[in-house]
Amino acid sequence: GPPGECIKVKGKILPDAKGFAVNVGKDSSTLMLHFNPRFNCHGDVNTIVCNSKDDGTWGQEDRIADFPFQHGDKIEICISFSETEATVKLPELEFQFPNRLGMEKIQYLAVEGDFKVKAIKFS
Ligand SMILES: CCCO[C@@H]1O[C@H](CO)[C@@H](O[C@@H]2O[C@H](CO)[C@H](O)[C@H](OCc3cn(Cc4cccc(C#CCN)c4)nn3)[C@H]2O)[C@H](O)[C@H]1NC(C)=O
C-alpha cells in the first residue's frame, strides 16, 4: 500500500522459536524491510536484524539493541513508511529503518519462520 498506511501483523511467537521474519517490499527479491528477530540463529541470540534486499542482493544489516520478545508472546507488529524510512512499532519498542530503495509502495508482505499469523490488517 501507499506511504503513511500502517501494515499490522498480529500473531504468536512459537514457544520454541529460533527466529522469524516479516518481509515487506515489492516482491521476495526486492524488500524495503526484512525484519528478523533472532532468538537463537545464525549465531545471534535475542537480536533483531533488519536489512533490505535489492533485486536479490542483501544490503547492510542493522542490528537493533533491544529485544522486546519472549517465546510464546502474542504480539502486534505495525509497519508504516515514508519515502525516506520505514517505522516499526512493537510493544515497548519503536524504531526506523531507512527506505534505501526509495520504494513508493509496498505490494508484498511475507511472514516466515517461527511465528503463527493470526491477522493482517492494512489501515
Ligand atoms: C559473520 C559473517 C557472516 O555474516 C552472516 O551472514 C549470514 C548470511 O548472509 C547472515 O544471515 C542472513 O541474514 C539475512 C539478513 O541480512 C537474512 O536474515 C538471511 O536469511 C534469509 C532467510 C529467511 N528465511 C526464512 C526464515 C526466516 C526466519 C526464520 C525461519 C525459520 C525457521 C524454523 N525455525 C525461516 N530463510 N532464509 C540470513 O541467512 C547473518 O546475519 C550474518 N551475520 C552477521 C553477524 O553479519
Image (cartoon, grey):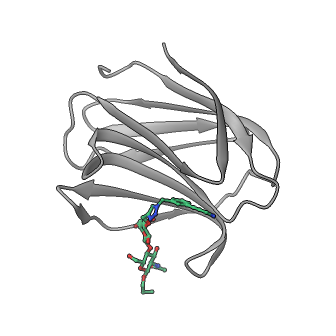
The picture places residue 38, in percent across and down from the top left corner, at 62, 64
Residue 14 vs residue 102, the one in the foreground: 14
Q: Residue at x 80, y 44 (%)?
A: 73
Above or below, 23 against 39 in this view is above
How far across and down, in percent of the image, does residue 84 sit? 27, 38
- Residue 108 % position (x, y): 33, 34
- How many dots with numbers? 0
Towards the viewer: 23 or 114:
114
Q: Could you tell me which residue is drawn at 25 percent across and 27 percent down?
A: 105
Q: Residue 70: which quarter of the image?
A: bottom right
Is residue 43 left or right of 106 when viewed as pictured? right
Is 104 situated left or right of 71 in this image?
left
Which residue appears at 82% of the width and 55% of the height? 15
Query: Is 76 placed left or right of 63 in the picture?
Result: right
Q: Quadrant of residue 59?
A: bottom left
Please provide percent x and percent y for residue 123.
Answer: 48, 13
Question: Going by the picture, which residue comes out furthest to the top?
Answer: 123
Res 94 quadrant in image: top right
Task: Identify the residue at horizontal 32%, vertical 21% (top origin).
Answer: 1
Residue 44 position (above or below residue 123): below
* Residue placed furthest toward the bottom: 43
- Vertical position of residue 18 compared to residue 83: above or below: below
